[in-house]
Structures are given as C-alpha cells and as structure tokens.
Image (cartoon, rainbow, N blue to C red):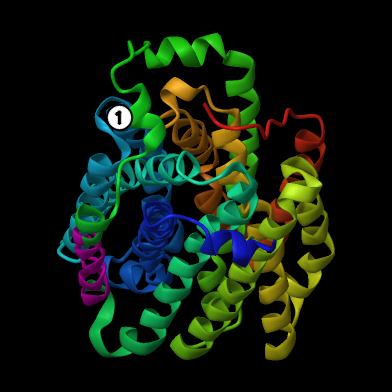
Amino acid sequence: MGVIGEYRELTRPQKTAIWASYLGWMLDAFDFFLLVFMIKAIGEEFGASVEQVSEALFLTLAARPLGALVFGWLGDRFGRRPVLMLVIALFSAMSGLSGLAQSLPQLLLIRACFGFAMGGEWGLGASLVMETIPAKLRGPVSGLLQSGYPTGYLIASLVYYLFFDAIGWRAMFFIGVLPALFVLFIRLRVEESPKFVARQHHARPNALAVVAQHWKLSLYLIVLMTAMNFLSHGTGDLYPTFLQKQHGFDTHTTGTLAIVLNVGSIVGAVGFGQFAERMGRRRNLALACVLVIPVIPLWAYSSSLFLLAAGAFLMGLAVQGAWGNIPAYLNELSPPAIRAMFPGFVYQLGNLFASRVSPFQAGIAADRGGDYAYALAAVTLVTAIALIAWIWFGPERREELE
C-alpha cells in the first residue's frame, strides 16, 4: 500500500494532528519571513544599514532556544495542544506590534519577543504529530511537516509581491496577525497526543537533568542543527536582499524568484520525505546536501533571470530536501519523557549558534563592495560539506516511539 493509501486509513485525530502541526509551522514561517523582504525598506525609514536591520533576524533566532525550553517544558507538563495554541497567539501578536515600532531599537526588541514565542512552535507541533501517527508514516509526514516552512516563506513572498508596493512595510506586519485565528481550529478540532496522555500521571523527571544524562546525543544534535540552520538561513534570509541590492530587481521580480525558491523547497521536503523510510534519515539528508554543492554557481552567479530561477528552484529543493528528515529524526532520537522540549530545544540552540549568519553574510558582502553572491555561496558551500561529514557518522533510531 502506498503513502496515500496509508494516509487514508488514518483516524480523524491523526489527520488533524498532521495538519495542525503543518499549518502551525507554515504560519510561524510566514510571520518570520515577512521581515526578510522588508530589510531594505525598514533601513531606509530608520536611516540604518542592511547589516544593522539584519540584527532583527539575529535576535529572533537567538531568542528561540529560550522559547523552546520554556514552552517545551510547559508542553511536557500540561500537554502539547494548549501550549501550541498559546505560542501561535503570542507570535501573531508580536508580528502586529512589529508594524507599530517607532525606532529600530523598538523593532529589535519586538522581534526578540517574537523569536521567544516562535521558539516553542516547532517542538510542540512535531512531537504532537510524531506521537500520534504510525511509525511507517513518519518519514513522509516528516517531509510534509517541514514543507510548511517553505510554504510559509512562499506565502510571505506572495503577500510581498501583491501588497508591499501598495501598503508598505508596517501594514505587512499587520497581516501577520492573521495566524492567530488558527488557534480556533486547534481548540475545536485537535486532540492531545496519546503518548502524552498515557504518561501524564507518571513522575516527571527534571528536564535539564535528562538533557545532561544524554549529553553526547545532545551535543551531536546541537552541532547538527547549527549546521542545518546555517544552511537554511544562509540560503534564505538574505536572498531577497541579494536580488534587490546586487541585481537591482524590483518588488515583483524579487517576489517571483522567492516564490520559485519556495516551490522548489516544498517539492524537496515532500519528495525526499518519500524516500526516508527506505534510505534512512542520515543517508537521505547527506544526499540532499551533496546536491546543494553543484547548484551553488547556478543559484548565486547566474546573470539571466531564467538561470537565476532555475538555481533558486534547485537550491530550495536540495536544502529543504535535507530538512525534510529533521522532524522525524529528532523525535526518534529524543528521550520520551521530554519529547515536547528536547527536539525543539536542540533545534533552537542550533538556531542560536547559527543566528549570526545573516549579519555575518551581510558583513562579508559589505567588505567585498556589496558582493552578496560571494557571501551566500561561500557560507553555503562550507556548510554543505560540513553537514555531509557530520551526519554520516551519527546515530539513527526508527523503532516505535515510547
């Protein structure tokens, strides 16, 4: 029986858990990526450089581990479902407040608070669905869940393409309040994780003590997620700025290429997810990183619009093809008692250590006279090679979750 047939056999709670997790991550990414399209416009209003405004991306990423720790701990104590509703409401509110900022320092503070709320979503959503579905579907569903990230980027690209010239950057952030309505869907349709329900009357261990007990696994995953976030944010966050600054593209051309990038990302995440059960998570991830390398010249150095679009599609496919393995991989390796907290925490700690990637790349470009192509290409090449070497010798576990 194929994946589609197996999906049809799922119960309604299993299906709603999948879509709740997917949509939550999609809306989270949508709110995050609204900012990347508006760095140039925000800098012009506040009299700041691209490098200064990109500190907002750094602060958002840097605040996420604390959010993953706090909201993950709450999710392990009170359930994935209610805490997931809380974090979606909070990051939506922070998006709206971003549009009211009267200075760059105010905006930086608000985006740090946004990152704190955003940090809780991924771990809660991923644990909810991975604890709910059959083991044989974890690979394909992992790819589907991760495709929510480029889908959110895609929707942000469309919103930028359609509305930015007419409404400006402040109103764009007001659109980011809309995901809060998704809380109603979770409240009415989504059921709690059966694994959490079965464990909720058991004695709860000290979460940090469990992390310390599994320190080798934690260290391996933190390094892995640092490199994975270098790959993702290093190819996505300054990509619109690269198109605007180095190629001089207008709103519509920039938005179109970002859309192409994210269509490729969705195809990659879902497509690689289909092979994860047969190939294994590590080999599947390594293969996607191998594909990144020959795409770099096409993606960063093409001069024609057609070749830039081809490079964007293939880069998105390879990068998110690698990421499609991550929800299942981290949940399968996680200690069961802290599954709402652990995957999100190691993921977001990796985000913290990779959080300087946008200012780092902006600084490289500035030092080379605005050469964003070199900055993006160099970071991506080194990261892909490092990931292939690191993942190849890592652990893997695919049995039934406890």
Q: Is residue 305 above or below residue 273?
A: below
- At x 41%, y 14%, the residue is 208
Name which residue type carries label 1. Answer: Val
Q: Which residues are magenta?
A: 171-184
**The N terminus - image quarter:** bottom right
Is 33 placed left or right of 365 in the picture?
A: left
Crowd rating for badge 1 (residues with CA inside 10 Å; few <14, some 14–19, many 20+): some
Quadrant position of residue 26: bottom left
In this view of the protein, which residue sits in the foreground, 369 or 393? 393
Q: Which residue is mark 1?
A: 70
Q: Is residue 140 above or below residue 227?
A: below
Residue 18 percent location from the top left of the image: 44, 55
Residue 176 within the segment the image draws in magenta: yes
Quadrant position of residue 399: top right
Q: Is residue 140 above or below residue 126?
A: below
In this view of the protein, which residue sits in the foreground, 237 or 51? 237
- Name the dominant secondary structure of the magenta segment: helix
Residue 106 within the segment the image draws in magenta: no
